[in-house]
Amino acid sequence: MAMIPLMMMILLLLFKFPSVVLATLKSDEANLELVFTYHKCNEELGNFTTETYSNNRNVLLSNMYSDKEIENGFYNSSYGEGPDKVYGIGFCRGDVKPDKCRSCLEKSSTLLTDRCPVQKEAIGWYDLCMLRYSNRSIVEQPVTDTDDIIKCSNTNATNKDRFDKELDDLVVRMRSRSAEGDSRLKFAEGEAPVQSSNETIHALLQCVPYLSHQNCTRCLEYAMSRISYWCDGKTGGWYLGRSCSLRYETYLFFELIFHDAPAPQPSQPAVTPTKDFPKKTNPSRNIIVIVVPVFAVAIVVVGLIVLIYNYFGARRPRHKPIQSEGDGEGDGEGEGELDNDIKTDELAQFEFATIKFATNNFSDANKLGQGGFGIVYKGTLSDGQEIAIKRLSINSNQGETEFKTEISLTGKLQHRNLVRLLGFCFAKRERLLIYEFVPNKSLDFFIFGKLQNKMF
């Protein structure tokens, strides 16, 4: 009889679910392009100690996003005097309208001061804008630096050599256009079809307007070299730097303003650039496409629950739960789910892309150590939290067993002298354990397998 209230609750949730989906979709449409991407609080310059600096920073940021005359999405100003003087720039993407630009800068101001409340210098990147403030002149700082972000698509190009050739030609053409802009706007957007495939490359390049032609070119060359290294053969790449940005995808991700269409063949008439782009999708159709499958899946789930209850209800002894004993080893392909014999209610399951990004694509510079189980890396999440990632060896015959055992044991342990397991990642053939990063001896006990000897 306990199954009946559960079934009623499930049905109630299913009837309520469409309104939740619709509300979520509307919220996503309103905030899709204002998703927080990355931020950095500069600890090297230290923290401010006076309320005057904090007030000057807040006034500067308020003036920035409330400026009705913000020109071409760029704001460069300062506020205050002496050691409490604050410099700031607000920088929107070249295809963003003024109202969206101000909205993005306002959201950026709130988020950045919340995450970097006492630091003298901070920078935040968003999809549509960048915000930065400092106690030193921003214009005089280096064009290229290590404070940059690179994100890559997970999809490989159909024809890598042809794709790379078209991408390089497109970027060179657009780089020249962007660098030739004036002190108001240095921005270029364009596309290039990839021969022998159905792919079309859409790209966007931009420099902060105060850069010279030479420095803008140099910054974009550096950006392309970084993307070419980390996103080699991928259908999408995104570089975010303090002085310039570069992004390419095989789908249209920007508003059409200045279109760099490929030159037509001599025997063919010129084609209007905007006709080459796919039509905008219908939001109502997207909602239907999402909601209908959800209902179908929900009905199947309810049916399965009823069948399982009817099948096992009469056979299962009352008040005696069945224990799962299966090892559940699979082929390691696709996104994984752990077996029922591993309790992960209090642990987070991380996306593999999140861990890859946090470790800078498992860079050797982030490597902490290595053992028979695999390699341990240090990483930093987008909120600034430092983590230690234990990447089990793909070739290890005991990788699955080690993975389950460590989650089961470590997830139950809570002690002030032992490092805490934050979560895990189970994708394709990857098995990763994510710990809090503690730079002392306690890290060794979990990461390098010494804990088990101490416990038993």
Image (spheres, rainbow, N blue to C red):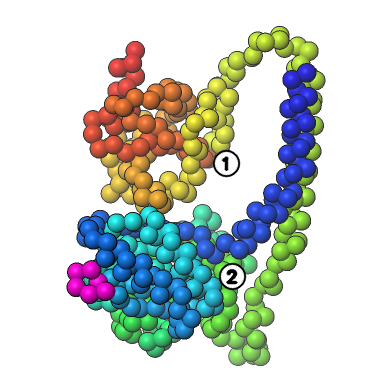
Classify residue 82 as left or right of residue 385.
Answer: left
Quadrant in the rendering for residue 11: top right
User: Of the residues shown, which amino acid type is indicated by label 2?
Assistant: Leu
- The residue labelled by disc 1 is 334
Give the residue drawn at x 37%, y 31%: 420
Query: Does residue 392 appear in this view?
Result: no
Query: In x, y percent, where is residue 15?
Result: 78, 42
Quadrant in the picture for the N terminus: top right
| Residue identifier under label 2 | 252
Tell me what residue is drawn at x 30 percent, y 79 percent.
215
* Residue 298 on image: x %, y %: 75, 39
Q: Quadrant of residue 10?
A: top right
Residue in the picture at 79% in, 38% down: 299
Q: Are marks 1 and 2 in contact (CB under 8 Å)?
A: no
Q: Write the start and end of the magenta stretch as one range.
A: 80-85
Disc 1 or disc 2, which is closer to the eye? 2
User: Label 2's element?
Assistant: loop
Quadrant holding the C terminus: top left
- The tag earlier along the polypeptide, 1 or 2, is 2
| Image: 297 above or below 3 | below
Q: Is residue 307 magenta?
A: no
